[in-house]
Image (cartoon, rainbow, N blue to C red):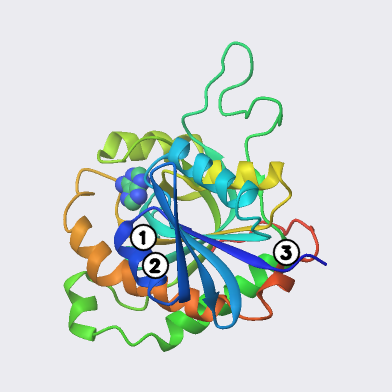
Amino acid sequence: MKNPIIGIMGAMLEEVTGVIALVENPVKQELGMRTYYQGKINGVDVVVVFSRWGKVAAATTISTLITEFHITELIFTGVAGAIAQNVKVGDMVLAKRVMQHDMDSRPLLPQYVIPLHKKIFFENMEEHLQESEKTITEFLTNQQINQQLLEQFNITNPKLWIGDIASGDQFFSSNEQKKQLADAFPTVLCVEMEGAAVAQICTEYNIPWTIIRTISDSADDNSSTDFQRFIEEIASVYAVEVIKLWVTPQTPNKASTSQPVPHRRG
Ligand code: ADE
């Protein structure tokens, strides 16, 4: 069996900075305008990197993690805008399936279909979801974030959702964008800018992937309100605490089979 090496990627520098601080004896390597930090978290080999924003940036970063750093598994943490009605700021979403809402090769292929893969969604694996679900639930149940701070963002009882995530090279900031996506994909819980690209490359290299998103905004006319402050004060704490719990010596066994799970929401 290969020596397990966990790739940890994030699209917000504030989140990744906290995770880098967890790395014991980090060794830095600069490649393609990114800095990769190799070392150990909880005794497990990791490589941590800030991917930058969007599908191209994410795809090139995950390719480098796989081909240059030989990761055996990938976890991506970041923020997302809420699409489904009951998903709230402060909730977390674990990706069961991911799709690209801006993929459109019509008339050659139906809208949203990924060329050559002949499908719209990349789907995650049973074991992976169950273990990650336990980890995130443990975090949300025991989280120690200052109550006053949570109240400032109207966060009460943050919840874990497991389901569909849409990715694309657009920051959603209007009611119209949100409605269009929700109408086209009623099962989509949230929108972000990297996950589907990461899942596609991981699938192509047969690398198990996990995508965990914290809801930072409502992906509508109000989406930019408090966005930066949310990243700095809440999302960065979520990312660090989840990674501390998620990266354990058992982590590499999380993805040992490839059974798709039936669809679940909430
Ligand atoms: N990531 C966080 N919020 C987002 C939004 N509103 N649109 C796209 N990606 C996001």
Which amino acid type corresponds to the residue marked 3 in the rendered image? Glu
> For mark 2, does the 10 Å Cα neighbourhood hold few (<14), some (14 to 19), or many (20 or more) residues?
many
Contact check, label 1 and label 3, Cβ < 8 Å? no
Q: Quadrant of the rendered structure where residue 256 is?
A: bottom right
Residue 215: numbered disc? 1
Q: Residue at x 69, y 53 (%)?
A: 207
Whole-percent x and y of residue 77? Answer: 45, 61
Question: Gap between marks 1 and 2, in whole Å?
Answer: 6 Å
| Amino acid of disc 2 | Asp
Of helix, strand and loop, which one carries label 3?
helix
Residue 174, above or below 202 = above
Q: Secondary structure at mark 2?
A: loop
Left or right of 227 in this view: 257: right
Q: Circle 3 sits on which residue?
A: 126
Residue 91 is labelled as 2
Residue 209: horizontal and vertical position, in percent? 62, 57
Residue 250 at x, y = what percent? Answer: 69, 79
State the CA–CA distance, disc 3 to disc 2.
22 Å
